[in-house]
Amino acid sequence: MAHEPDPMTRVSLAALVGRLLLASVACVGVLALVLAVGPAGGGDTASLPLDLTPRHLVVVAVIGGVFAFVAVAVGLLLRAVRDARRFEREAAGEVHHLRGDLAAAELVLRSEATLVISWDPTGGATLLAHALDGAPRELDQLMRFSLWLEPASAARLTAELDTMFRDGEAATFMVRTVDGVPIEAACRVHGGRAFLRLREAAGERLRYAELQRQFEMISTDSTRNRAVLDTLPYLVWFLDEAGKISWANAAYVAAVDAARLDEVLEGQLELLERRDRAALHAELTQRGGVDERAGSSDVTVRQRVHMIIDGERRAFDLVAVAQDGTTTLFASDVAALEAAEGELSRQSAANEGTLDRVSTAVAIFGADQRLTFHNEAYARLWALGASLLDEKPRDRELLDHLRHAGVLPDTGNFRKWRDRLLSTYRSRQPHEDFWHLPD
């Protein structure tokens, strides 16, 4: 960098020139005074050496002052020339260093797949370097980011550039080309100019780009999934590692009479009663779903709970899934189902009481072919003990027991007869069979 002359040097030179001018003027003044006093004192001008008249002395004094001034001016000029040559040599050396730095910078830029664009204060753009594969070569095409960047990346880059131009804020972030190549983008303002540097991600930058890509995908999936959960009529809410509500869907927010999700999070508005929460936490802990030291493993717990919604105590089927220290809860309203189950249970009890009083033997087997009901007439008909019937045996087991007891009809091929009888479980049509029992 070229050096400016020292301000003190300029001041001293100006003072020296001023003193020389004053000395010259003073010399002329003294001579004029001597000449003026000489004749007035009655002196004889003929006594002056070399027969010099006063006019001659004035001329000599003026010429002497001029020569003195010229000599000093020449000296100052030589000194200025010497200083200028020194400044020129220093400036040439600085230019040499700057050219070396510029060459090194160009070498660095060319050693990587890098693209650099600069904007001057008037907004004019200049392409300083371009070694980035997959990007247009022309500046006007290059500035149309949507042509060669992914839509989200093009929008992000445009927004960051607008922020840089408006606020001067620097930013470094990742974008991707339409071919999926990760690119590191850096926006900077320096010396009144704005710069955009794009370079292909490699090494640590590439790993960072992949992590950022994964984070963006997870964030997008999370946003999409929460939007879907918001449309469900079921209650859905998340608990963090501390057991506090971290998110809830719209149905849950409405169930706790909150206007916004923020109210639920700030007030930690719970629907589960304290004892139900304690029982759920205890079961998750017992099954390894909650481990404060080692995090959480995938554990699913299902419970029937009751919660107060709109002032009414209602039944819900609750599913809690613990994973990685957090818990996701789903609750579906089964109040109508519970009422139907209660009514069905009451009707079944009434029917069983009625069937138990009739003299016809009646037995009911479930879909798994196990005995679910029998009346007293059925037990008496086959002389079956209470211990066997209380075990809820399968139909096959009962038939085998009755065959060994010798109370079944003679069928010739018992196995074939039994299999044909049991095949009725797979039929939707009613089946009627007549047995001729032995005496």
Image (cartoon, grey):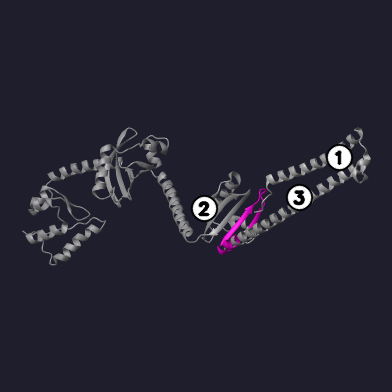
Q: In the figure, 270 relative to 140: above or below?
A: above
Q: Split into 4 quadrants, where in the image is the N terminus?
A: bottom right
Amino acid type, callout 1: Leu
The residue that label 1 is drawn on is 31
Q: In the rendered view, tell whether residue 308 sits above or below residue 136.
A: above
| Nearer to us: label 1 or label 2 | 1
Residue 305 lies in the magenta-colored region: no
Decide if residue 14 is on the left or right side of residue 267.
right
Instruction: Determine which of the numbered discs, if any, sits on residue 258 in the image.
Output: none
Residue 140 visible in image: no
Circle 2 residues within 10 Å: few <14, some 14–19, many ≥20: some
The reply, left or right, for residue 156 in relation to residue 266 is right
Q: Residues within 10 Å of mark 1 (few under 14, many from 20)?
A: some
Residue 210 can be seen, yes or no:
yes
- Residue plotted at (30% across, 46% down): 319
Q: For marks 1 and 2, give the CA distance.
A: 84 Å
Q: Secondary structure at mark 3?
A: helix
